[in-house]
Structures are given as structure tokens and as C-alpha cells.
Image (cartoon, rainbow, N blue to C red):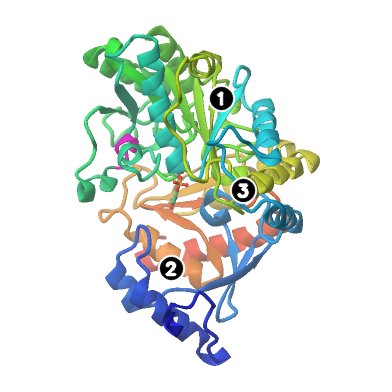
Amino acid sequence: MSAAKSTKLSKPKPKSKTRHWRALDAAHHIHPFTETRSLVAEGVRVITRAKGIYIWDSDGKKLIDGMSGLWCVQLGYGNRELAKAGCDALNTLPYYNHFFKTTNPWTAELSAKLTKLTPKGHDRVLFANSGSEANDTALKLIRYYWNLMGKRDKKIHLSRASSYHGVTMATASLSGLTPMHPQWDLPLPGFAKAPTPYWYGAKEGGYGDVTPDEFGIAIARATEQIIQEIGPDRIASFSAEPVQGAGGLIVPPSSYWPEMARICKKHDILLHTDEVVTGFGRLGSWFGSEAYGLEPDIMTMAKGLSSGYQPISAVSLGKRMGDAIAGAEEELVHGYTYSGHPVASAVALKNLEILERERIVSRVKKRIGPYFQHRLRETFEDHPLIGEVRGIGMLGAMEMVADKNTRRHFEKLGHAGMICRDHCFHNGLIMRAIRDTMVLAPPLVIAEEEVEKLLVKAKLCLDMTARDLGVR
Ligand code: PXG
């Protein structure tokens, strides 16, 4: 093997480290959701270590990670118990699968643990390695369920505008973020879209001056209209994030979910909640389904399941689907080499143990969540650039607009977001820009003083953005 192909990290001189890794990355690494040419021109940031709510780059710059990586590091970075759990499993059983009538202790225990935390009736789980795979699996199981029931016409998967469900052919088709489609000739046939309960955009969406509750009902009814047009007998499932994350942190009005759940039941449409972001305490409950009183037929989870320390995801089946699928008199023709990987399972199991032991979910519900929400509103509600502050639990968003009174967005949507995001980087804060909405999803273990530090930086960056845009 040539030196260049060696798996060992090459050892550059300290001073030139950043340049060295940048050059390697620029020459060989294609990044997700990134324009490669402009990244190469700009130069990538090399992240080398992390602890608590902080990450460091290779030049020693320290940043507050206001996004928990990609909405996943519930316990923050550097948790030694998680590292030890992974390390112990690596030393004991680095790999084995579940295909040959075999299991391992960690995956067996994790399955049982998950069924205790998920809604009533969710007694069975399948494992995968990412949110996309979990959702892809969910779509297959939904199709299979209806085939088992003899309802072979129920094939259409309904989901919502601005939703994010993954990047496989099927889950990108399920996703309602339309920029995810043209490069790949998607969506595939068999996917339909419903509107999203984005109340702040109601006026622009042609709904006029409506209260959040009126809007929630209107969107649910518009969804029912679509169901009627397609024909309920052709619709297999309704997939939705209880709170939409990557689509711009859309928190539904309280009237929306009860009405949507009623409509799904009425038309015998399976309810699939995508808990990839909303699971594991993010909203102050174990799952978003619980927060909104939902009884999903199928649920998918990833990210916070292992606090992002290992790639692992899961699909839990409600009674109806669980009984049908586990009771089928044939092989389930599905599974991944790494489904229920022992190391990932061990880390996830320990992660759940810590979340429970340290009462982190209840801390989000009772203390740090309300504190974060209150301080977010106090800091930004009167800011000249911010039209709406919204959030729940440890999810927060500030939507930037050109005119607060009319809710008019900036003409070039996304421009303000990019300006603000760049200020954040320079000032040591990672804040996600979704179009012109700035999103925060810090680790659930963040302390009150750390929330304050984060908000000082966020305010500074929004002030700088307002100045750049000439908004006062
Ligand atoms: N469902 C939801 C709700 C998600 O947010 C996925 C599924 C897919 O998970 P995987 O593990 O396949 O990536 C996600 C992922 C962003 C961002 O910039 C969000 C996600 C992924 C990457 C970037 O907000 N969410």
C-alpha cells in the first residue's frame, strides 16, 4: 500500500496542520449539501475536538455549538460514560449481526428499553443506522402492512411541505423540501404533499389574518381535502415530524395535531411520526408524539437515540402494525449489515440510562426548557429584525423579516440567514440558518449560565446582521 493510501493519519508539522487537512479535504472529499467548488475556494473548517457545549477547530478557535451537531448531541460532547460503553462493547463484541437467528445483549436490552419509552402499544422495534434508513424502512413496513391486510391499493405516502425525512430515493421523495428533488428526478411516483402548519407565513400563504388555532384547523382541513381528492382508499400513510426541524422549525398551533389525528383515524391512514429530531427529550418529553398526545402507528427515531455518538436509528411499531408484521407467516425480507450494531446499541443503551438517571427529559420540561424559551423571547421579541420568536423545549427559532408589521420577508430569501450565520461563526457560535430563520437546538445538558453566554453571542450576531441590512 502506498503512503498516500495508508489508513494512518499523516503527521504534518503543527503549524501547517490546518492547511494540510484542508488540502486533503479539498482534493478528495465531497461534502453533503454543499457546493464543492465554493467550499474548495473558501477553505473548510477542521473540527478537531469537543467538550460539553463547545467545539474547537484546528486553529484552536472555540465555538458554542448551538445546534448539538445536527440536532443530536443531547448529552453534550465528551461524555466518558458513553465513550466507555462503546469501548467496552468494541473490546467484547465489535461486530455481529441479527440475520442468523442471533442477537447480542445490548441490542436485546435496547429493544426492551425503547418499548418502555415509546407510546403504549409500541412493543416491537427494528434497527437501522440513520434517520433516512429508519424512514425508508418505515415506508416499506407501511406498504407491507397494507399488503398483509389485503388492501393493496393503499400505496400513497402523504407528507407535508417543508418536511425533511431523509435523502434516500424514497425518503427524499417523502420530504417536502422541494430543492431536494430536481437533481435526482424526484419525487418518485406514489408520494403526495399536504400543506404545513406554518402560522407565521399564513398571510403570505393566502390565509389572511387568522389566529394560530384557526390556522391549525384550516391546514388540517386542507389536508383532508387532498385526501378526499386522491381517495382515502389509496392513501397508505401520513408522515410528519411533530415539530418540523430542518424545514424552518415549524411549531404547529395547538389545534392542528388533534384534528390531523382525527382525520387519519377517520380515513384509516397510518400515522407515522418522524421523531428523528423531536425524540429523546428535545421537546421536554421522550417523544414529540407524547408532547402532542398522538398515538402513532409507527415511529422513527435516530440522532438523540445515541446522542449522536454512534450511528443508530430505530423504527417502533404500534400494536396494529407490530402484531401484523411479527405475526406474518413468512420471512421479513429486509435488514442491514449493521442493524442493531453491538457498539451502537451499547452506546444508545447507556445514553438512555443517563437521560433517565439524570432526569434530563424532565429537566427540559420543567427547568431548562422554560428558561431557554423565556430568555429567547425576552432577548429577541423586540429586536427590529425578528418577526417571530418560536420554539418548544430546547428548540428555538428567530425568523428575520424586512418588515415586522407586515411580516414581509426579505426579497432575496436566505441572504440575511447567510450573513447572520457567518457572523455567528466569526463570533464563536454555531447557529443554523434555514432561509432567514436562525435556529438553535443546544445540548439538553446546557446550564443556565451557558444559555446566557449563547444568547449574548446570538444577540451580537443579529445586531450585526441588522446593521449590515440597514434594519433599525
Ligand atoms: N428525519 C428528520 C426529521 C431529520 O431531521 C432525517 C430524518 C434523516 O436522518 P439522517 O440520519 O439520515 O440524516 C433527519 C435529518 C439540517 C440537517 O441541516 C438536518 C438533518 C440532517 C442533516 C442536516 O438541519 N436531519
Report if residue 44 lies within the magenta region: no
Q: How far apart are the two marked residues, 1 and 2, measured between alpha carbons?
A: 35 Å
Residue 113 drawn at (x, y percent): 70, 32
| Mark 2: amino acid | Asp
Q: Which numbered tag is attached to residue 292?
A: 1
The quadrant of the rendering that contains the N terminus is bottom left
The quadrant of the rendering that contains the C terminus is bottom left
Identify the residue under disc 2. 422
Crowding at label 1, few (<14), some or many (≥20) Cα neighbours within 10 Å?
some
Crowding at label 3, few (<14), some or many (≥20) Cα neighbours within 10 Å?
many
* Secondary structure found at label 2: helix
Front residue of 7 and 83: 7
Front residue of 125 and 217: 125
Identify the residue under disc 3. 344
- The disc, 1 or 2, on the residue closer to the chain's N-terminal end is 1
Q: Does 172 sit above or below residue 315? A: below
Give the residue at x 38% y 43%. Answer: 405
| Mark 3: amino acid | Ala
Outermost residue on the right side: it is: 357
Q: Is residue 198 visible?
A: yes
Task: Respond yes or no on whether mark 1 lies under 8 Å from ligand 1.
Answer: no
- Give the magenta part as a residue range: 173-177
Q: Is residue 249 visible?
A: no
